[in-house]
Image: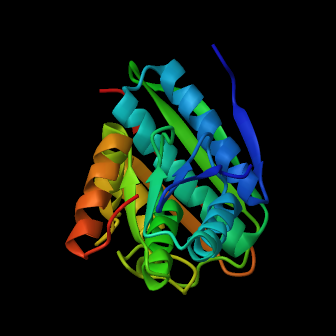
């Protein structure tokens, strides 16, 4: 099940719609890395609102998506981690380390705008 | 009232199925949303171990009763290579390379009972239980 990736100006928004398999996540990582280059994107938003669980593989892949995008010149924000999902990650000992997070899509876009403007990019 | 749920675990799509079945059963048993998530997480980690290391196995999810309390039992069996050093495999951060090394110790932390038996060359069985509070 491919995750739709929408282009909004300088930002790519990947909205996860259903539970993802490990290969879906890896495919999302590869498509995002490619599209960041194709669209010369400065930011990526990963919306995980619908996910009812983030396990070790998902946490690792979200980190890898953010690191890959960073090497391609884009900043990633993960948005929409549900409270129970966050609690489960803490209990299991999982973290997103230095990946930016925000409460929801709106906060994520505001965060991206602030980060990019600090770097001197005008955000479209 | 549902009976045993058995999920064959061979591909990564089966991990998603096991998670969903586990959450459904945990909800039926009466676990809170947070506890459902912890049960789902443990199922996901253990199912992925089967796919990554054993390639083929199965998981049986059962509603259990004991001394007036209710809970859920998750039994994962595989006929994989087995785990030569269980103590080492249960250590936080230990991995033979395919993961973060949080799957087994993390799963043990989020359930009430965790029993792992393994014979090299024969396979591994993990039994987890979580009880309603």
Front residue (pair A75, A113)? A113
A31 relative position to A8: left or right:
right
Q: Name the outermost residue toward the top.
A: B1
Residue B87 in which image quadrant: bottom left
Depth order, front residue of A118/B6: A118
Quarter of the C terminus of chain A within the rendering: bottom left
Q: Position of residue A44 (x, y in %)?
A: 46, 62
- Position above or below: B111 against B80: above
Q: Position of residue B96 (x, y in %)?
A: 54, 86
Can the viewer see residue B100? no
Q: Is residue B2 visible?
A: yes
Q: Residue at x 57, y 58 (%)?
A: B46
Q: Is residue A33 above or below residue B47?
A: below
Residue drawn at x 66%, y 47% as measured from the top left:
B16
Q: Looking at the picture, tell me which residue is in the foreground, B59 or A60.
A: A60
Res. B132 image quadrant:
top left
Above/below status of B112 relative to B77: above
* Percent of width and height locating residue A33: 59, 74
Q: Residue drawn at (66%, 19%), measured in percent from left and top?
A: B2
């Amino acid at each position: 099940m491919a995750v739709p990736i929408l282009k909004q100006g300088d930002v790519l928004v990947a909205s996860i719609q259903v539970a993802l398999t490990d290969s879906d996540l890896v495919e999302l990582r590869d498509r995002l890395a490619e599209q960041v280059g194709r669209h010369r994107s400065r930011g990526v938003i990963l919306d995980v609102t619908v996910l009812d669980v983030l396990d070790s593989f998902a946490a690792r892949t979200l980190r890898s998506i953010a690191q890959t995008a960073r090497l391609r010149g884009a900043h990633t924000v993960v948005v929409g981690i549900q409270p129970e999902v966050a609690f489960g990650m803490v209990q299991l000992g999982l973290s997103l380390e230095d990946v930016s997070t925000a409460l929801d899509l709106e906060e994520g876009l505001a965060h991206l705008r602030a980060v990019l403007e600090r770097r001197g990019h005008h955000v479209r | 009232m549902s009976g045993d749920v058995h999920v064959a675990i061979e591909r990564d799509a089966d991990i998603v199925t096991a998670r969903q079945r586990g959450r459904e059963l945990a909800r039926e048993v009466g676990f809170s949303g947070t506890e459902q998530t912890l049960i789902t997480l443990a199922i996901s980690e253990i199912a992925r171990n089967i796919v990554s290391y054993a390639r083929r196995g199965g998981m049986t999810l059962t509603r259990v009763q004991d001394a007036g309390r209710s809970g859920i039992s998750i039994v994962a069996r595989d006929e994989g290579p087995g785990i030569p050093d269980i103590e080492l495999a249960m250590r936080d951060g230990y991995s033979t390379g395919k993961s973060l090394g949080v799957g087994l110790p993390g799963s043990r932390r989020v359930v009430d009972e965790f029993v792992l038996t393994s014979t090299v060359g024969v396979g591994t069985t993990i039994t987890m239980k979580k009880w309603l509070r």
